[in-house]
Image (cartoon, grey):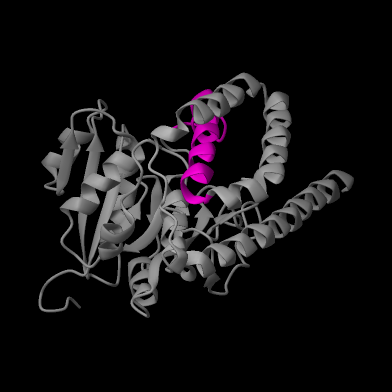
């Protein structure tokens, strides 16, 4: 039911040449038990007929002339929304019927909740997780909690470092306090950045296991690793730390961050993307001062200390989950 006849949520779907995904996504939204939402598609200058498809069906949309990236598209949608909450949803998703209602129920619990991440399950491997919220580590590595593990698990709500913006709800008024998605990111780690800022200001990000959505993954970029993604994510990782960590925290974390860069370089060298990764790192350091750094305020000191603890525990969680995945691979080979 809608309060006073007005929707409480705007579902914002950024789209760039995603025509093949649009119909199943819209069908799934049409089956939602909670009807307390409007839909707004933000088309990023698509050339695959997406615009015509949207117009023919009368789906509310904003049509941008050029590809402004994920950040630019969702910012346009958030600014156009009039509802208390905005729900960002990738076009390559199919949410289950209780998806919107469960996210809305969770974020409504407290005004100190900024974002709620859903239980994202791999569309073509429904026995496997895609994300149970995103985490961050003192090594400067962002990662999807639970990725590749059994989707039968991860059924407990908990606080996470960041919501995955591929399927998450946000309290709209908070953007006016902490700022919007950073359009310098274009794509990748922009959701980690916005949730990091929210945590500095004392807000919380949660994981809701009862809001289930099936996700293709890399529907726009085309693959898990490619030259574009590797370079952009490497650059944005530098931006993320520079903007959100005060100088003393950067100094404390400088060695683990440097170690994280070296280990990742070795990882991408094995995949043949070491050049792109190095270029992204160089660009990040060369242009990071063009980013707007979060001003340090003494009143946020306890939040910074809590974040530092999360970065350390996030590293331990990454090692644990990585070890589980490696053990699983070894067991499969031995069978």
Quarter placement of the N terminus: bottom left
Residue 301 horizontal/vertical position (percent): 51, 66
Image position of 180 (left or right of 125): left
Location of residue 323 with respect to 266 vertically, above or below: below
Residue 3 horizontal/vertical position (percent): 16, 78
Q: Report the label total.
A: 0
Residue bounds of the magenta highlight: 221-246
Residue 167 in view, yes or no = yes
Image position of 319 (left or right of 119): right
Q: Residue at x 82, y 52 (%)?
A: 327
Looking at the image, which is closer to me, 213 or 256?
256
Residue 9 horizontal/vertical position (percent): 24, 65
Looking at the image, which is closer to me, 287 or 334?
287
Q: Residue at x 34, y 47 (%)?
A: 181
Image position of 52 (left or right of 142): left
Looking at the image, which is closer to me, 9 or 28?
9
């Amino acid at each position: 039911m809608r309060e006073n006849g007005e929707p409480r949520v705007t579902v914002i779907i950024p789209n760039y040449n995603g025509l093949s995904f649009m119909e199943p996504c819209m069908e799934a939204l049409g089956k939602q038990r909670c009807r307390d939402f409007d839909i707004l598609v933000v088309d990023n200058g698509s050339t695959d007929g997406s615009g015509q498809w949207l117009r023919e069906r009368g789906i509310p949309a904003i049509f941008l002339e050029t590809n402004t990236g994920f950040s630019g598209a969702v910012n346009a949608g958030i600014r156009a929304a009039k509802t208390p909450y905005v729900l960002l949803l990738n076009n390559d998703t199919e949410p289950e019927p209780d998806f919107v209602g469960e996210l809305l129920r969770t974020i409504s619990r407290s005004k100190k909740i900024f974002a709620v991440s859903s239980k994202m399950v791999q569309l073509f491997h429904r026995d496997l997780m895609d994300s149970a919220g995103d985490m961050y580590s003192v090594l400067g590595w962002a990662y999807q909690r639970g990725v590749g593990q059994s989707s039968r698990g991860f059924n407990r709500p908990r606080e996470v470092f960041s919501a995955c913006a591929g399927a998450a709800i946000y309290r709209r008024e908070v953007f006016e306090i902490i700022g919007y998605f950073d359009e310098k990111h274009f794509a990748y780690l922009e959701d980690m950045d916005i949730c990091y800022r929210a945590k500095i200001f004392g807000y919380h990000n949660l994981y809701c296991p009862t809001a289930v959505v099936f996700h293709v993954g890399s529907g726009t970029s085309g693959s898990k690793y490619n030259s574009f993604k590797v370079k952009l994510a490497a650059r944005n990782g530098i931006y993320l730390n520079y903007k959100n960590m005060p100088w003393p925290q950067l100094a404390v974390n400088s060695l683990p961050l440097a170690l994280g860069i070296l280990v990742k370089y070795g990882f991408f060298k094995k995949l043949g993307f070491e050049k792109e990764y190095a270029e992204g790192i160089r660009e990040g350091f060369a242009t990071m001062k063009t980013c707007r750094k979060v001003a340090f305020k003494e009143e946020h000191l306890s939040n910074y200390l809590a974040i530092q603890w999360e970065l350390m525990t996030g590293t331990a969680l990454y090692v644990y989950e990585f070890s589980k995945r490696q053990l699983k691979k070894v067991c499969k080979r031995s069978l």
